[in-house]
Image: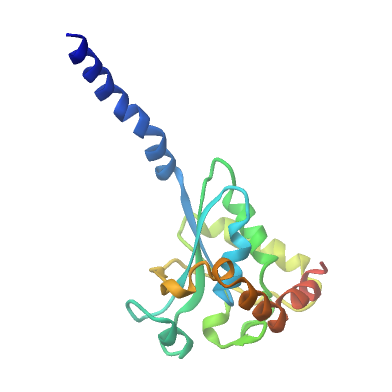
Amino acid sequence: MIRRLLIALALLAAPLAALPAAASAAATRTAVFAGGCFWCMENDMRGIPGVVKVESGYTGGHVKNPTYRDVTSERSGHYEAVRVTYDPARIEYAFLLSRYWKLVDPTDDGGQFCDRGPSYRPAVFVDAQQRPAAERSRALAAQRLKTGAMKAQILPLQTFWPAEPYHRDYARNNSVEYHLYRTGCGRDRRLAQVWGK
């Protein structure tokens, strides 16, 4: 009898223990941003409180399952981008947008920093619900620019294709190479000019 009672209690407790994790996963949302090198975007977005996960990948193109070679050939139509999974109970989409603008040069529609070509252009990819917030945020960011005019676009959300494994977590896995690239590309120097940091 006691054994049956313990088994019944264990069965009742098991679904309750699993509930918070399931609720937490269901409560997350995603945002997709293109801002030049996805290694830099991934690294910079990762440290924001409330961000659960950041993935490098490709979006906005017409080729299924694109590779890095497809995208950088500038024939697939994709952008290098990041998909940011966040907890809306801890951070708002509007805050992610305001942070995004400071990580890119939205005055440059020919690429970003030393990376040139359409696949490196800055853009925010949105669904219908996200569009009003993205448009408002873009207008506010345009007023805060220290140089140039806003050229970054707000585009319809499309399929996000994760990048190849060797591109993921690049800054963590290749810190020396990453910092040499970032410094050599002049990203932070240009951001200081655009935003007055």
**Front residue of this view, candidates 156 and 92:** 92
Q: Position of residue 146 (x, y in %)?
A: 81, 72
Q: Position of residue 48 (x, y in %)?
A: 63, 53
Is residue 46 in view from this perspective? yes
Q: Is residue 76 above or below residue 82?
A: below
- Colouring chosen for the image of the structure: rainbow
| Residue positioned 40% across, 43% down in the render | 26
Q: Is residue 11 above or below residue 126?
A: above
**Residue 38 occupies which quadrant of the picture?**
bottom right
Q: Position of residue 10 (x, y in %)?
A: 27, 22
**Residue 191 occupies which quadrant of the picture?**
bottom right
Q: Quadrant of the C terminus?
A: bottom right
**Residue 190 occupies which quadrant of the picture?**
bottom right
Q: Residue furthest top?
A: 1
**Front residue of this view, candidates 179 and 108:** 179
In the displayed structure, does residue 121 sit left or right of residue 196?
left
- Report the number of numbered marks: 0
Is residue 123 in view from this perspective? no
Q: Position of residue 181 (x, y in %)?
A: 65, 80
| Residue positioned 42% across, 90% down in the render | 75
Q: Quadrant of the N terminus?
A: top left
